[in-house]
Image (tube, rainbow, N blue to C red):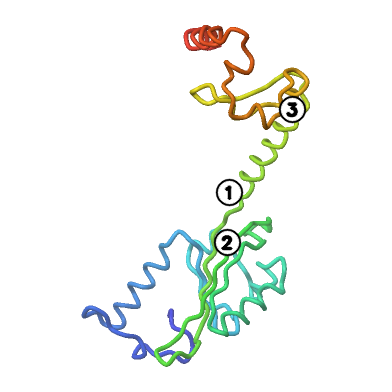
Amino acid sequence: DLLPDGVKPSDMEITDGLSTEELLVCFKTIVENTPDPIDISDPEGNHWYHNIAFIELFGDIGTNPVSTLFVDKSIHKDIIKTTQAGNQWSREIEMRGRKGELLTILFKAFPIRNDQGKNIGLVGNYRDVTSQIEAEEAIQASEYKYRALVENSPDLLYRTDLNGIITFISSSVDNLSGFTIDEAIGMKMADAAYAIPEERQLLLATITKNGS
């Protein structure tokens, strides 16, 4: 039964010739097969339904899902307060997965209202973004290490676009050329570093032919 206590099938609108029972079957099928974990609670947050994806992510949540799922228990109170006021709640939070592991979850909650505008329940949508967050952190760490290596290298390191315009240059440019970083950015490499600009074209031709 997907309806919370106090809500009768007759309270639901019949759409496009479907009976209430058929409409409920349609809704249940959609919810059960959506890839995102979904749960439904009463307005006070007492959990009474979840779909298959929810079980796959969180496992057996027991009789007290708040203590099982939420790392910060105060967040649940804020969710209930927000949805009881008729508003949606959305944030990335830490939750525990089926093996007790920490997960970063993009959690969205919104109230369910009947035709009279009465708040009769709460829907939660959970999206596991742990891998995405870890990948972003790894990229940031890699970029930091790369920048630290480049900035502390005594050699002149630079990057140009296809037209030979300098888009990045290391801080050693000041000691080796007399240009500041700001002055060098935007210059043509042929003008900045080559006494004979045509030599750069020969270098590029060699790189294009041999790959190095």
- In which quarter of the view is residue 75 placed? bottom right
**Residue at 52% of width from left, 6% of height from top?**
202
Say which element carries label 3: loop
**Residue at 58% of width from left, 49% of height from top?**
132
Q: What residue is shown with label 3?
A: 171
Q: What residue is shown with label 1?
A: 132
Say which element carries label 2: strand
**Residue at 37% of width from left, 67% of height from top?**
30
Q: What residue is shown with label 2?
A: 106
Question: As shown in the figure, which amino acid type bears the numbered disc 2?
Answer: Leu
Label 3 Cα neighbours within 10 Å, binned few <14 / some 14-19 / many ≥20: many
Q: Nearer the viewer, residue 5 or 83?
A: 83
In primary-sequence order, the first of circles 1 and 3 is 1
Q: Position of residue 186 (x, y in %)?
A: 58, 29
Question: As shown in the figure, which amino acid type bears the numbered disc 1?
Answer: Gln
Q: Position of residue 7 (x, y in %)?
A: 43, 89
Residue extending furthest toward the left = 17
| In-image side of 16 versus 62 (left or right) | left
Q: Position of residue 194 (x, y in %)?
A: 62, 11
Query: In this figure, what is the number of numbered marks?
Result: 3
Q: CA distance from mark 1 to mark 3?
A: 33 Å
| In-image side of 157 versus 47 (left or right) | right
Q: CA distance from mark 3 to mark 2?
A: 40 Å
Q: Position of residue 92 (x, y in %)?
A: 62, 62
In primary-sequence order, the first of circles 1 and 2 is 2
Q: Is residue 81 above or below residue 58?
A: below
